[in-house]
């Protein structure tokens, strides 16, 4: 299996702009620029945001896969990926997942998420520090 994405850029780094698109067309000519990458509130995406989305999606699917193999079907799994960029180096990706899953303890859920953190294909592809945290929704309280 191969998947593709494309990027187009025009102009210099400070004033230029570009677009990114995916093979499926779900992302089609989405704008990005130096400003959308480094200035808060500027419209457009950026590589770190896209990497975070890819990693969050991959990690969440891996958690669902591990749970399913244990006979547990999650009602919901929600992941936030925070990608840290310092001096043009991605130094960390933190994955925070909240799950609504019956039949599992908080400790077991954390074990599942740590396995997914190490073994999802995007985690394996990255050569940076990857961390995660897990939140299991329980009927009356969140752990």
Image (tube, grey):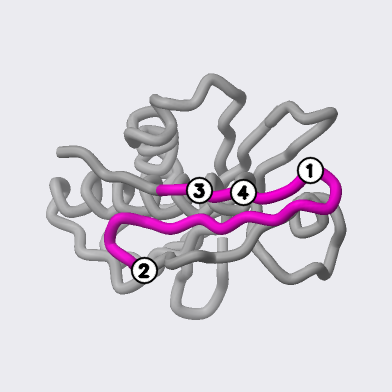
Label located before the other in sequence (2 or 4): 4
Front residue of 9/77: it is 9
Residue for point 52% across, 79% down: 140
Label located before the other in sequence (2 or 1): 1
- Closest to the camera, between mark 3 and mark 2, is 3
Task: Decide if residue 134 is on the left or right side of residue 94.
Answer: left
Task: Decide if residue 137 is on the left or right side of residue 73.
Answer: right
C-alpha distance separating marks 2 and 4: 19 Å
C-alpha distance separating marks 1 and 4: 9 Å
Label located before the other in sequence (1 or 3): 3
Residue for point 43% across, 48% down: 6
Q: Which residue is mark 1?
A: 12
Residue for point 23% across, 45% down: 66
Residue 7, percent across and down?
50, 48
- Residues under numbered marks 3 and 4 in contact, where contact means CB atoms less than 8 Å apart: yes
Q: Which residue is mark 2?
A: 26
Q: Which residues are magenta?
A: 6-25
What number is the disc on residue 9?
A: 4
Q: Quadrant of residue 113?
A: top left
Residue 75, percent across and down?
30, 73
- Closest to the camera, between mark 2 and mark 4, is 4
- Closest to the camera, between mark 2 and mark 1, is 1
Query: Dot 1: what SS?
Result: loop
In the image, farthest residue toward the front: 11
Residue for point 83% across, 50% down: 38
- Closest to the camera, between mark 1 and mark 3, is 1
78 in magenta: no
- Dot 3: within a 10 Å radius of its alpha carbon, few (fewer than 14), some, or many (20 or more) residues? few
C-alpha distance separating marks 2 and 1: 27 Å
């Amino acid at each position: 299996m191969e998947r593709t994405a494309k990027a187009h850029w025009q102009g210099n780094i400070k004033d230029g702009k570009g677009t990114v698109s995916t093979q499926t067309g779900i992302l089609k000519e989405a704008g990005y620029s130096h400003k959308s990458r480094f200035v808060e509130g500027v419209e457009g995406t950026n590589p770190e945001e896209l990497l975070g989305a890819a990693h969050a999606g991959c990690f969440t699917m891996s958690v669902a896969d591990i749970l399913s193999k244990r006979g547990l079907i999650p009602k919901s799994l929600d992941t936030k990926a925070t990608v840290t960029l310092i001096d043009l180096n991605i130094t960390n990706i933190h994955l925070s997942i909240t799950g609504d899953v019956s039949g599992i303890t908080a400790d077991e859920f954390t074990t599942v998420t740590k396995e997914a953190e190490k073994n999802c294909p995007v985690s394996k592809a990255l050569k940076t520090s990857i961390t995660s945290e897990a939140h299991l929704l329980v009927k009356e309280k969140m752990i």
